[in-house]
Each structure stands twice: as structure tokens, then as C-alpha cells.
Image (tube, rainbow, N blue to C red):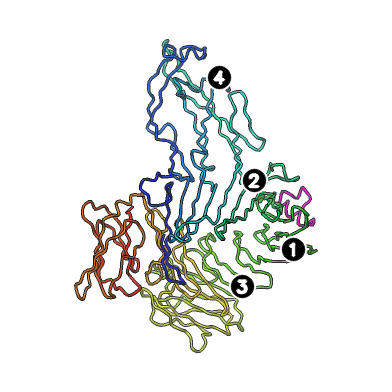
Amino acid sequence: MHLIDSVMGTDIVRNYYYNESGDTSSISPSTGEIAREPKYGLQYMVMWSSDYTPNYFSAEFIIPQGYMRQLTSVYPLGVTSGNTVGYRKVTTVDSNKLRTEHYFTSYKDFPELADGYIDARLSDDDSRVIEGISYEVMPYAPEDERDFLRGKLTKQIEFRKENGVFQKIHQTENIYGFNMGYEINKFTHMLPDTLEYLTGMLFNIEGYSDEGGSPFYSLKKYSLYTTKHDLVRTIDKQYSYQGGSIDSLVTQSDIYYGDSPWYIDSLYHYQPTKITKFTNTGSEVSKIYYPYHWRYDVPFADAAEEAKMQTLEAANRIAVPVLQVVEDSATNYHVSSVKNTYSTFVSGKLAVNYIKTKIGRASTFDDNISFNRYDSLGNLIEQQKVNDIKSTYLWDHKNSFPVAEITNADSASVAYSSFEADGKGNWTYSGSNLDTVAITGKKAYKLTGSNNITKSGLTSGSVYFVSYWTRNSSAFTITGTQSGYPVAGRSVNGWKYFEHKITGQTTVTITGTGWIDELRLYPSNALMSTLTFTPLVGISSQCDANNRISYYVYDAYNRLTMIRDQDNNIIKRICYIQSNNYSAMSGYTAVYTNVSTSQQTSFSVPSTWGLQTLGQLTPGTYNLTISKTGFQPTMIFGAGCNGYTISGTSATFYNIVITSSNCKTVSIEMAE
């Protein structure tokens, strides 16, 4: 991943490594795991004798019935977080200055469980062990999936480079409690009260008997288990280096999931209810209350609040905290409390209206954050810190995505539309005069002179900004525009930006003819930033408070690969490398040819991916050729200038303008 520091203007490169060494070593083994190789058949056999003593596990008592082949693998390959390959360790290195190692649970920790059995678990006939190898008999029981237990972060270690050496500065270790409900043996099954298992039955029709009667049926039962896994402890260590010695600050957090009296695991939810934190200087305990706790003595809750807890529980909203109390473990001194209160906002349903806090020995709670408005689906429309500025949000795509955030304005005084979907963002307009050529998103709206766009409900004494992009060379007409406005801004790809300052109006009307996009209205002392989305893919564009636009680029797999600014410069780039075959990147030469003088300058390109600074060049206009002799795989070549890339076995870039600080890098990456 590559991006430019917006303040310093320097390259920031994050490299991801999926091997044990966490670097570019080609001999370091991968940390990736798959569950098993596909197996498209199993030996089918029966026992001649019904006496299953070990003496009979020999060739003369086993009757092979052939090899059963299938079109698909007998057992699934298994996945980790939905992917065929799961990684136990992933290392990230930021600009060769900060190194972070991430460790995860994997398939080896939690393989699938196949629990097929015959005769109500009273025999061992569900499998055969021959010369130490276990063979399952037909039919094959489905496996109980354990993917949800893989990919859990178990450890994260951060290093910072000092004097050329990476030193450990921070480590976090997570310890989980995995309650699997495993079977102990055929006759005893240990299953916690909080877990359940489902039993199924498999049928397999065998061939006809020698007497020519009905076919045999093989029956096998199997179990699928529920389970519970909890993060029960986190150990955090901060390291400092002084005078050749190492100091560490250790914080241990123990997490409990019980109800009252706080040490019995909950039968009703899987949320943490108590967190005890130990440090070098002391300890504190946090108690977290949920709607279910109305049955117990919930501190600082009156009858009305407990009634709302019951309403939340009845609606199965059991995972939302209603109160968190922090106390000193040694003295029970009250450190702080945070309480969520509820009001009927959304279609007769409860929603949080205040977050309240109480510090130390204070006798009452203070209102801290107010949630003022929600839409019909429960999306937040307006919030604020008490006695502070308001933040407003507008939603689109059937109220599924937030498309605008406005600070220092209430929801009645703002409007926004990029004309992407069903939402109109507080604007009023009719018709579907849409075009697929837009400045943001994928659609723009056409004014024809009879389909004006309006926004009512404004305050005549207030001042507002109305801004938009249009393909016209001149601005649209808006009543109430002040002297000196509209102001014309930048032009991008045939679109021009205009801004009006409006006052003395309760309704704003935009009239004229031509295409319009990214239409905003907000008070003069407010700021608005906006987003457009491609459903099922992600953000397609972002426009900040200064109307600077960023475009999000995705590959054929809907993975984010690039963020460009409105001038097509790359702000951030993400590269997906399919292998650690760095040898394929070696042997390349970059030849710069000065267009004016024909003088050539050659550089050897380092055999690693990402942007590489090659050397000094006299400012001027150049043609650049990147190539190598011998085997030439298909690669992605970059000129490091405005994001130019070419896919092929070699690449030539024409008329690159090189200055003292621009366009002096190249990149070579593995093609997909």
C-alpha cells in the first residue's frame, strides 16, 4: 500500500508479509494454512465378524467393498474467515520504520469436528482403525464448521527502528475462553448448560443381498454443536529504553461475562459484564449493565429507566449497554459512570437520547452527548455534545449509506444530493433527467427550465451557501444571491464549480438549464463533506468541505486498489501480490531518454515491489522504458508520476516531465 503524507509530501509505504520471517526472504515458509488436500474417495469396507475385539482387526476378517469415488471432495477444504487460505502470522512494515507482527488462531488450532456415530453411541462401528489408520464407514457424516473460531487476534507486537535496529515498543496478548462442548467418549457427553447440539440422520442405500431381497440401509447419526468463545484476558505491555535498560508498563484486563453476582456466566447474553484492570500502580473494576439486568439492582436507575430496559429486552435488544460503572478495586471509590438513556424516537421504538456521565463523588449525572433526531429506520440524523455545535447526517440508497456530514448545522438547514439513488437529501425536484457522466458518483441531474430544484423551511435572517458543479460555463440563477456571488471555482473534466451566498430567503430555488451535480446547501458557518457509494462495492468518491474530490478505484474483485484526487494524482495505492516470487522482479533496467537532447540515463531497478527512487536526473521531459532480457513475465510497471501504470512484459512511458522533486520513481509489481 502506498500513499503520500498530505502534510510533509513524503511517500508512506506499508508492506504486508505473509511468511515466518516477515520480510522479503524467498526461503522463509508461508504462514498460510489450508485445512486439507481435497479427497475424492474413501475405502469402503465392512467387518465379517460382529465381535469387534482387537484380534479381529486383521485382513481375514475385513471385507473390502471397493473404493468409493465422488465428484466433489469427501470433506470440504475448510475456510478461515471465509477464505480458503488462513494466515497464522501477518507482518506489516511502514516505510521501514514501524514493524507490526499480528498472530491469529488458525485451522491447526480449531479443525472441523466430524461426529458421526452408530447405534446411539453404543459401538465403535462408525469407523475402522487398520494398522493405525482410521477409516470412516459409509455414509460420511458432515463436519461441524469451526471457521468462526479462526482468525482471532492472539498477539500483536510493534517494533520501531532506532539506530538501524527494530526495538519492541508495544505488545498486546489476547487470551480466549473456548467452550467447545466436545464429546468425551462414546458413552459420556459433556455439554455446558449454555450450549446445545442438533442431531441428524444419514441414510446410505447399499446393494441387494445375495437372496435378492430389498437393499440394505446404512444409518448413521451425527451431531452439530453450538459453542461459545470469549475474550477473557488482555495483557498490554508498553516498553521504553533508557540508558541501555528496558522498562515496561504492564496492564492486564480480565473480562467476565456473568450476571449478578458477577462471577456466574450469563445464560442470556454473551456480552462482558465486568472488566478488572491491573496496572503497575493499582487496579480498577468496570461493571457493565445491559437491559436484562433490570432483574437485579441496577445502580442509579429509576423505575422509568428500568421499564425501558424491559422494553429493550422484549425487543431482543439485549446487547446494548445501559450503564457502565468504574470503581477503584481496593477502596470501592466511585471513579466514573456512563449511562445511556432512551426515549421513543423511531416509529414507536426506543433510541438513545442522551449519554450521561457522573465523575467521582458527584451526586447527579450530567448530560454529555445528545442524540436529537433519527430517521424511520433508526439511522442517526442529528447529534451534539451538550451546549456545543451540532453534527447532522444525510442518508441515501434507501437510507442504507450516510452520504453527507455537516458540522455546526441542524438537519432543517441543510440539503445535499449527488443524484445517485432514491434519496433527495432534503431537496425537492421531479423527474429522472439523469446522466451517467458525473463529477461525483455515477449520475448527474439535468435542469430543463421547468424542473427547478428547491429547498424550503429556511430562516430568512440566516446566511447560507449553495454550491454545485455544472457543465455550463456560467452559473445557475438562485434568488437571494448576495453581491459578489456566485463565485466560480476550479474546472475538472468538463465540470465547473460555482458557489452562491444566499440570505433573506425561506425557500431556495435553483433555475436554469444544464447539468448539475454535487449540489449542497448549508449555513455559512457550517462545513459539509460528502460521499458517494457503489452498492456492494464501496465508496466511489469523497468530497471534502473545500470541494476537493477523491475517487476510489477498485479491481475486478472489488478490492480497493487506488485513491486519486480530482487531478488524477494518486493519493493512496494498494497492491495485492499473489506470491513472494521476488525473483521475477529482478533484472529490470529503467532507461530515461531526454526528449530534447536524446541523452540516455540507465538505472538498475531493485528487485522488490513498491515505488523505488533510482537516482538523479536533470529536470526535463523524458521517455522512460523499463525492460529486461531473458524470461519476461507479465508485470505492472509504474512511472511513479501521476499514477501512470502499464501492464505487460515491458513498458514505455512518453513525455514524462521530471522536476527536482517529481516523477523520479518507478515501480514493478506482480500482475494478477
- From which residue to which does the magenta span run? 290-311
Alpha carbons under labels 1 and 2: distance apart:
28 Å
Q: Secondary structure at mark 3?
A: loop
Q: Secondary structure at mark 2?
A: loop
Residue 516 seen: yes
Location of residue 192 with respect to 357 vertically, above or below: above
Query: Do callouts 4 and 3 mark residues in contact (Cβ within 8 Å)?
Result: no
Q: What is the chief secondary structure element of the magenta stretch?
A: helix
The residue under label 4 is which amino acid type?
A: Ser
Pick whichever of labels 3 and 2 is earlier in the sequence. 2
Residue shown at 51% from the left, 66% from the top: 403
Q: Residues within 10 Å of mark 1 (few under 14, many from 20)?
A: some
**302 within the magenta span:** yes
Residue shown at 41% from the left, 26% from the top: 42
Residue 275 at what x, y percent from top left? 68, 51
**480 within the magenta span:** no
Q: Secondary structure at mark 1?
A: strand
Alpha carbons under labels 4 and 1: distance apart:
64 Å
Residue marked by disc 2: 270
Pick whichever of labels 1 and 3 is earlier in the sequence. 1
Q: Residues within 10 Å of mark 3 (few under 14, many from 20)?
A: many
Image quarter of the N terminus: bottom left
Query: Do callouts 1 and 3 mark residues in contact (Cβ within 8 Å)?
Result: no
Alpha carbons under labels 4 and 2: distance apart:
37 Å
Residue 247 at what x, y percent from top left? 59, 56
The residue under label 2 is which amino acid type?
A: Tyr
Residue marked by disc 4: 123
Residue marked by disc 1: 359
Alpha carbons under labels 3 and 2: distance apart:
37 Å
Q: Which of the 4 image quarters holds residue 188?
A: top right
Residue 350 at what x, y percent from top left? 68, 57
Residue marked by disc 3: 410
